[in-house]
Amino acid sequence: MTDTFAAIAAFDGRIAKVTGPVRSGKTEALLRRAAHALANGCAPEDILLATTTAEAARIARQRLAALLAARGADDAAALAARVTVASAQEACLAVLATPQAQAATGRAPRVLAPFEYNFFLEDMKTLGTPVRRLRAVLNHFNRQWCALAPEEDWVVPGDEQQTLDLAHRLLHATNAMLADEVAYVCGRYLQSEEGSSARQAFSLVLADDFQNLSAAQQTCLCLLARDQLIVAGNPGETIAAATSCPNAAGFTDFDRLRRDVTTFALSAAFGNPAVTAFCDAVAQAGDCDAAVAAQRVGKGRPLSTVKWNAPEDEFNGLTRYLMDLAAKAPDAPLAGICVVAPNKTWATALSQMLSKRGFTVSSLGFERLGGDPRETARARALMAYTALNLLADPDDLFAWRAWVGYGNYLTYSDGWKFLLAWCDEHDAGVLEALDAASKARAAGDPEPFPRAERLAERYDAGRAMIAQQSARRGHGLLAAIGAQDLREFDALAQAIAGDEDATALYALARASQFSPTHDANPRALRLSSYEQLCGCNYRAVYAAGCVDGFMPARDAFEVVSTDDDRTRVREADRRAFAAGVGKASDTLMFSTFSTADLELAERTKMQVTRVRMEGGRRVAAVRPTCFIEEAGAAAPLTQSGQTLLADTDIA
Ligand SMILES: Nc1ncnc2c1ncn2[C@@H]1O[C@H](COP(=O)(O)OP(=O)(O)OP(=O)(O)O)[C@@H](O)[C@H]1O
């Protein structure tokens, strides 16, 4: 076992693959390889360690610093900081950010935030394609981009070509890029003649959780390696966090597709054997050939499932239990504890309850801005974000597209279409068109293009907002953009010192959308989504809301979908669940409940087994997540919430 780690650390071949089950030390092996390379004179700048998420990168960097310190390196943290540790998406964005890449691709890596995608979608609807068909075509594009399939090879003339042409037109005009295009544009660039100097930028590329990356991301990382490439992973732990299309086969077949790949198999799982046995059992009950530990190293401690009557009891009881735990061990860093929430509703309820009980909470995985840009009342956070974007960069063309679209049930997509036609006719850019519309409005002249007056009105208001607010800073700036009382901006408001200008604040707001990480505060209890557990390691994990419909999602049961659809959802969730709860090295508790108000159950998509009347209310019966039962002998025993509280002298 130790020999395998030593062999990976000292590996001097060109390509290697590290396989291993949950918690077998795959990341550890890559970190030891990096430490060994540094000790042998490799420049830190010549190493790329790529991960699935920004949080996984943050943790990997910390672990690398700790490893270097343990080996007696001088100033280990500074040395680790010089190594490029980044998510695969960030690594691709860094390639595309160079002037050479921008000149060669004609694209800027200004990625649309998920809520900005809605504006793009509205503009795409001007084609007149039925919305379902349009979504299907755009999903098809995403899959092709993720597969790094050259557009010229797959686009079908007619409808599809027209759709692709409009997508290009909209994105080029606003200097923007879709998230799933990033690795595609990067990969095509790296494969091209012009991109040859950007290839092989790192002597050593270490790619962790390779199964989570899209084929395009996987190819980009391979192209960035000069002397050595090592990929690590486990198909049974695949999650869709780095991309919407993880390509687990790119890991499974990695050695078949290339020559002379050395394979290292890790087979011992570390941490609590009951946890890793549970994860392996859940994964094995599924449809993929996940790696299973041959040996389990560590101190055993039973898992538990706690069943509450209703969600309110869960929120109350679980947080009281955690409060009692924290009081009994006041010196243990709370950051070693993670509460996992299955969705945003649960995350919000748990976070509020934990805060009420006096915890500082760092939440991760639920910060994505949502809301309908077509309804002003539901788009306040989006409008604040766009206002901040414009204050930070008044030349951001996509921010203008969003700004002029708020408050209209079609986001002024028709106006935007006429504006782009005017740009084509006059060989002009978006800002010139908006300026022309604004001038005509001021002079009372006829509109330069239909709907120009409406767009000009919004544009003028935006210019006035920039003129008025651009000198503001910190909390005053947040108030000026209307963000001071918005829950979506709470974390940002708490994190700032108060003297940040718009550029600094916007960078933070943007990071929360694209590369969110946990607060570094060791006193903050963690609250996380399953996806954001990737790359983490916690002393204790409490998985809340473990009911069918949440985990796996209701689509795994719905009678309206096909068998294939149901299986796909169930198996994707199974991997996220097994990989996620495996991050508990010592304590793992599942929290579930048996009933819920029918309205809440429907709204949050629980899988309802029965409905009954209780005191004039309609109450839904729900089941614990099926994965627990599927773990068979490795599944924990269930106890009631009341018993748990009584045992800990709370009730
Ligand atoms: N050789 C080792 N000896 C002792 N402990 C180890 C060793 N390798 C890893 N560990 C510990 O086991 C845990 C899991 O390690 P690591 O995160 O590297 O594994 P992984 O296979 O990447 O995990 P995951 O399945 O979660 O991706 C960590 O707490 C780590 O410190």
Image (spheres, grey):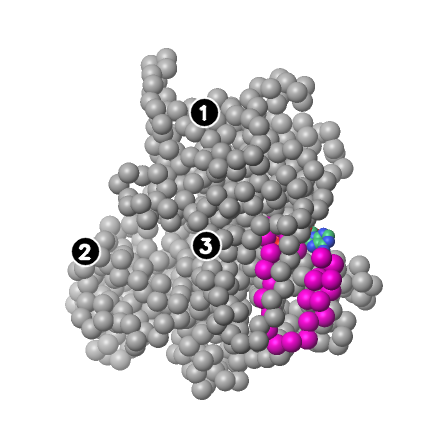
Q: Quadrant of residue 191?
A: bottom left
- Under tag 2, what secondary structure? loop
Specify whether tag 2 is near ligand 1 (CB below 8 Å): no
Tell me the amino acid under the disc marked 3.
Ala
Q: Position of residue 624 (x, y in %)?
A: 47, 31
Q: Quick check: 162 left or right of 29?
A: left
Disc 1 + disc 3, Cβ < 8 Å: no
Disc 3 marks which residue?
240
Alpha carbon separation for disc pair 2 and 3:
28 Å
Residue, x 71% and y 57% (percent of image)? 1
Q: CA distance from mark 2 to mark 1?
A: 41 Å
- Count of number-bearing discs: 3
Looking at the image, is 495 positioned above or below residue 352? below
Determine whether the residue tagged by mark 1 lies in a helix, strand or loop. loop
Q: Amino acid at mark 2?
A: Pro
Please name the residue that numbered disc 1 is placed on. 594
Q: Position of residue 194 (x, y in %)?
A: 45, 85
Q: Nearer the viewer, residue 121 or 503?
A: 121
- Please report whichever mark, 2 or 1, sits nearer to the chain's N-terminal start: 2
Question: Mark 1 Cα within 10 Å, few/some/many (few <14, many 20+)?
Answer: some
- Can you tell which quarter of the image residue 141 is in? bottom left
Residue 525 in view in this figure: no
Q: Quadrant of the C terminus?
A: top right
Disc 1 to disc 3, C-alpha distance: 29 Å
Is residue 21 shown in magenta? yes
Residue at label 2?
130
- At 57% from the left and 19% from the top, the residue drawn is 642
Front tag of 2 and 1: 1
Residue at 41 percent of width and 28 percent of height: 622
**Callout 2 crowding tier (Cα within 10 Å): few <14, some 14–19, many ≥20:** few
Span highlighted in magenta in the image: 1-25
